[in-house]
């Protein structure tokens, strides 16, 4: 997903104006709001969190340790997850790694949704959307996390709810019984 669109979605989730978000002449994402311009994906998300009074913003900055962990996940989302989700070999490894991670965790940082979860969610959205129901079953822990986040209207923002039910498989596995 384009960084501009991701920033806009995260701003909306946090309940703050996105401002003017665009790529500058050097292809670096920038945000201008009230004549204040900031550059860089992680920096913009940090500013959005400071402007927001939402629960997700508070969760993301609750302690210095949490804020540092969130920042690292955001950088990981930009530098590795978003580009890697477009490469079939890297994308399957990403899904396996996240599936393994979510076997013991409900969220990326701490015990609540943070900006880290949003950054990764939007970075892998199209990848997860492209998975067949059978492929989704290979990543049950990741699917649980993803489905949990997409159920929140402020995160989904009117987008399609991806199907994670195994009953859906029945339509895929049509057979003839004698």
Image (cartoon, grey):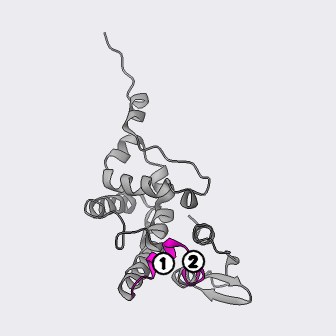
The answer to whether residue 26 is magenta is: no
Query: Label 2 crowding class (10 Å Cα cut-off): few <14, some 14-19, many 20+?
Result: few
Q: Which residue is found at the position 42% from the left and 72% from the top?
A: 80
Magenta stretch in the rendered image: 47-63
Tell me where residue 110 appears, x and y as whole percent: 34, 73
Q: Looking at the rendering, in which quadrant would you find the N terminus?
A: bottom right
Query: In this orientation, which residue lies closer to the viewer: 4 or 101?
Result: 101
Label 2 and label 1: CA atoms lie apart by 7 Å
Q: Which residue is found at the position 58% from the left and 67% from the top?
A: 13
Q: Quadrant of residue 30?
A: bottom right
Q: Quadrant of residue 60?
A: bottom left
Query: In this orientation, which residue lies closer to the viewer: 128 or 151?
Result: 151
Q: Is residue 122 above or below residue 174?
A: below
Query: In this orientation, which residue lies closer to the viewer: 107 or 72?
Result: 107
Tell me where residue 87 appears, x and y as whole percent: 43, 61
**Marks 2 and 1: CB-CB under 8 Å?**
yes
Residue that mark 2 sits on: 53
Q: Is residue 86 above or below residue 163?
A: below
User: Helix or strand or loop: what does disc 1 sit on?
Assistant: helix
Q: Is residue 27 visible?
A: yes
Predominant SS of the magenta segment: helix
User: Helix or strand or loop: what does disc 2 sit on?
Assistant: loop
Q: Which residue is found at the position 61% from the left and 72% from the top?
A: 11
Tell me where residue 90 appears, x and y as whole percent: 37, 63
The numbered mark, 2 or 1, whose residue comes first in the sequence reads 2
Q: Which residue is found at the position 48% from the left and 49% from the top?
A: 130
The answer to whether residue 57 is magenta is: yes
Q: Is residue 68 above or below residue 129?
A: below
Residue that mark 1 sits on: 58
- Total marks in image: 2
């Amino acid at each position: 997903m384009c960084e501009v669109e991701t920033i806009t979605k995260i701003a909306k989730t946090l309940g703050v104006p996105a401002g003017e978000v665009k790529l500058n002449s050097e292809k670096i994402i920038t945000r201008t709001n009230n004549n204040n311009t900031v550059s860089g994906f992680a920096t913009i998300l940090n500013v959005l969190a400071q402007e927001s009074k939402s629960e997700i913003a508070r969760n993301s900055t609750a302690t210095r340790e949490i804020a540092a962990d969130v920042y690292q996940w955001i950088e990981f989302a930009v530098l590795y997850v978003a580009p890697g989700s477009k490469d079939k070999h890297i994308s399957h490894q990403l899904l396996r790694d996240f599936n393994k991670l979510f076997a013991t965790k409900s969220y990326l940082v701490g015990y609540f949704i943070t900006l880290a979860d949003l950054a990764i969610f939007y970075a892998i959205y199209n990848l997860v959307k492209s998975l067949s129901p059978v492929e989704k079953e290979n990543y049950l822990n990741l699917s649980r996390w993803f489905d949990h986040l997409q159920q929140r209207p402020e995160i989904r923002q009117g987008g399609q709810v991806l199907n994670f039910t195994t009953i859906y498989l029945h339509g895929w596995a049509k057979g003839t019984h004698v």
